[in-house]
Every structure is written in structure tokens, then in C-alpha cells.
Amino acid sequence: MARDQARQSSAGPKRRWLDIVVIGRHPKATLARVVVLIVACCVVFRFILLPIRVEGISMLPTYQDQSLNLVNRLAYLWHEPQRGDVVSIRLAGLHRMFLKRIIGLPGETVAFENGWVLINGEVLDEPYEKSACDWNCPPVKLGPDEYFAVGDNRTMAWTEHRMGKVDRTHIVGKAIL
Amino acid sequence: MKSVLRLVLIAVLMGVGAWMWTVLFPSPEKIIRRRLVELARIVSTSPGENDLARLADANNVASFFAASVELKVTLPILSQHSSLEREEISGMVYAGRSQVGRLRVTFPDINVKVAPDKQSAVADLTVEATYPGDRQLQEMKIFLRRVDGQWLITRAETVQVLS
């Protein structure tokens, strides 16, 4: 009996200290904070910053295969996508998307000539492009709501690289990392 | 206290009732979604599959389609706009499965819109096909019609996202 009491008295302060660290002095307030945090995370990571995992090599060397990133869905709320932006492009939904770089804007004509990108016949300066390529593509005229998107990995074979015209409605947001 | 308990019990019963209703009488959207998931499962193939199973699955796939199906596919490797009979689809699936050793098809995103008369529907979906060494993503539009209580595919076309 005496031994039990002694054990309880020694475990008491320790248990209390652990409760304060884990739950806090006011459990109700802690619970409210946890609920607010969960709701905030759900809203932020569903409607504002979309977490994505990059799969594939089409954006090398800018984005490595299996790297993690965030897509800002509000990036184009006030202005339209700009040349050089890395954007995520949706298909039927948001579970699988393409990650590409915008090189052509609405109304422009985009072409590849011996690896050089030509916008309306002028060579485009691409500081993010580290490797030379030999791609050739006849001029593509973009419509009023169309952008030209392409990956950074131009060492890939032309036929294996998904690129081309993309409608504005398919652009979900801008990669932020 | 007793009335609160009674209210909670009524709310729980109503919730269970609503859930049971959706299980027993699923909406057309849910039925179509389920059928498409089933179609993806059947189209997928694994190595070592015997000919009989392959044939059975090919016939099974054909049962998801109407007697005549309009196919409009525009891909870098294939461009086809044709009308196919159910048997032709079965043959194509069988041949395709024989050629590909391993194929995993999934529809990660399915958006279904049912017409007000509930006799036709359009499903906008993402097709993800994974096979040895590569993976392809493609958006597709599938048109379905209700025939004898079953939702059958009448038309399938690719949607050009990056073209």
C-alpha cells in the first residue's frame, strides 16, 4: 500500500509535466487550435498551394525526378502567365498534371530551328537552358487563349517530349520552388 | 439530457439511412464511375497471363461498349477516326494485351456529367497507362448511353492538352 502511494507520488508530477507539454494547460484551447490548424492546412494545401511530386525527366535539370514542389493556384488571379514561368497543366483533374515552362504567349508564332526557339521569327533567350539540342519544329501559331509549353530537358528525343499548345483553362498555377 | 440523446440517435439513424440509400440506389454518376474503374482494371494486364484469361478479359472489355463505337484518337504515335464494332474492339484489346507484357491502366480523375434525361452521359477522365520503361498520360472524353439499364460507351475521343 505504502509502496503504491510512493509510486503514484513520484509518477504524478512527471505525468502532469507530460500532459502540459502534449496537451497544454488548457485542453479546450489546444483542441480548438488543432482544429483551426487542420482546417487551415486543408484550405491552403487544396485551394492555394498544391503539393506536387515531379515524376519524369522532362524538366531536368531545373526539377529532378521525384522532387517535391508547390503550385501556387492564385498566381494567375491578377495577371496572366508570363514567358519563362514554370506552370502545372491539368488534364481531367488535379491528380495528374504536367509541369512545363511557358515559352510562347497568346497570338505569337513559336518554332524550333536547330534547337533554337523562335518567337515570331526572333531567337528567344533562354538562360535556364543548359544543354544544346537539335530540335526542329515548324511554326505554330497560338490562338488568343493559347500558350506554348515545353520542358527544360531538350536533350530528350523530340518524339518523347510532351509539349505544345495549351489552353489557358488548363493552366492550374505556377511552381514556386 | 434524454431529449439530446434522442436527437443524436435520430441524427445518427438519418445518416445511416442516407448512406444506405446511396448504397442501395447509387446515382448514375456513381455507377458510371464504378464501371470505368472496372474497365481500367480489366484493361490492365500482367505478365504470365494465359491466353484464355486474355480472351475472357478482351470479351469483358467489349461488354463495356455499345454495338457500334465511334473512336477519335489523335496521339503522336496514332491517329484514328473510325467507327468500330464491338467484336473489333474485343480483337484490338486481345491483340494489344498479347503484345504488351505488363500494362497498368488507371483513371486518376473522372468527372461525370449526366444529361437531364439520365439516358446519356459524358465522362472526362485522365488515363494513366504504365508499362515497362514508360508512362503515358492522356485526357479523354467518353460518351455513354443507357441501353437496357446498362451504361455503354458509344464514343471515345482524346482531348488535346499539349498539342
Image (cartoon, coloured by chain):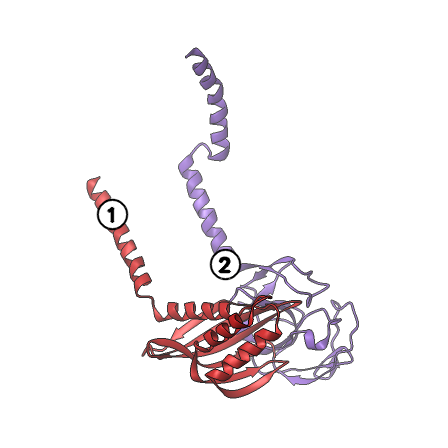
Spot occupied by residue A169 in the image (x, y as percentages of width and height): 52, 74
Query: Which kind of residue does numbered mark 1 sit on?
Result: Leu
The image shows a total of numbered marks equal to 2
Up/down of A148 relative to A69, above or below: below
Spot occupied by residue A29 in the image (x, y as percentages of width and height): 42, 39
**Mark pair 1, 2: CA separation:** 33 Å
Quarter of the image for residue A59 reads: bottom right
Query: Mark 2 sits on what residue?
Result: A46
Q: Residues within 10 Å of mark 1 (few under 14, many from 20)?
A: few
Query: Mark 1 sits on what residue?
Result: B9
Indicate left or right for A50 with A139 as reference: left
From this viewpoint, is residue A9 visible? yes
Q: Please give the chain letter of the residue carrying mark 1.
A: B
Q: Please give the chain letter of the residue carrying mark 2.
A: A
Query: Which kind of residue does numbered mark 2 sit on?
Result: Arg
Determine if marks 1 and 2 fall on one subunit: no
Chain painted purple? A
Q: Secondary structure at mark 2?
A: helix
Give me the residue at 54% from left, 77% from top: B94
Q: Quadrant of the C terminus of chain B?
A: bottom right
Given residues A79 and A36, the one toward you in this image is A36
Furthest residue in direction left, as rendered:
B3
Q: Mark on residue A52?
A: none
Spot occupied by residue B61 in the image (x, y as percentages of width and height): 47, 75
Q: Mark 1 vs mark 2: give the one in front.
A: 1
Q: Secondary structure at mark 1?
A: helix
Chain B color in figure: red
Indicate left or right for B69 with A70 as reference: left
Indicate left or right for B124 with A76 as reference: left
Spot occupied by residue A55 in the image (x, y as percentages of width and height): 63, 63
Q: Residues within 10 Å of mark 2 (few under 14, many from 20)?
A: few
